[in-house]
Image (cartoon, grey):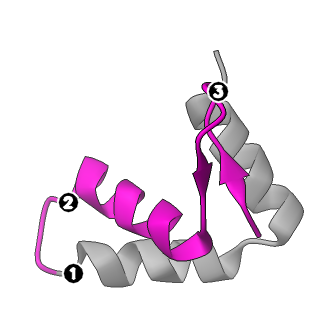
């Protein structure tokens, strides 16, 4: 799955996870938490979360 920011930049799944980790890293387990969150969502739910965060 490819994600696009509102400015048209494309992100792969790995880049999207890395970005979310970097934006919210609060402890040593942040990456595991984001991967768990990412893996718990369907593609539609994940796209909705992405759009809610990145679209104006």
Q: Which residues are magenta?
A: 1-28
Q: Quadrant of residue 9?
A: top right
| Res. 6 mark | 3
Residue 48 is left or right of residue 30, and the answer is: right
In the depicted structure, whether residue 54 falls above or below residue 34:
above
Q: Secondary structure at mark 2?
A: loop
Residue that appears at 12% across and 69% down: 27
Question: Which one is earlier in the sequence, the residue at label 1 or at label 3?
Answer: 3
Residue that appears at 58% across and 32% down: 54
Report, in whole angstroms, how far the alpha carbon at label 2 lies from the one at label 1.
8 Å
The answer to whether mark 2 and mark 1 are in CB contact below 8 A is no
| Res. 29 mark | 1
Residue 43 percent across, percent down from the top left: 83, 68
In the depicted structure, whether residue 45 falls above or below residue 35:
above
Pick the front one: 52 or 55: 55
The answer to whether mark 3 and mark 2 are in CB contact below 8 A is no
Residue 44 percent across, percent down from the top left: 88, 59
């Amino acid at each position: 799955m490819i994600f696009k920011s509102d400015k048209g930049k494309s992100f792969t799944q790995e880049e999207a996870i890395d970005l979310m980790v970097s934006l919210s890293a609060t402890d040593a387990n942040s990456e595991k938490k984001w991967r768990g969150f990412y893996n718990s969502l369907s593609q539609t739910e994940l796209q909705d979360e992405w759009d809610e965060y990145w679209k104006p």
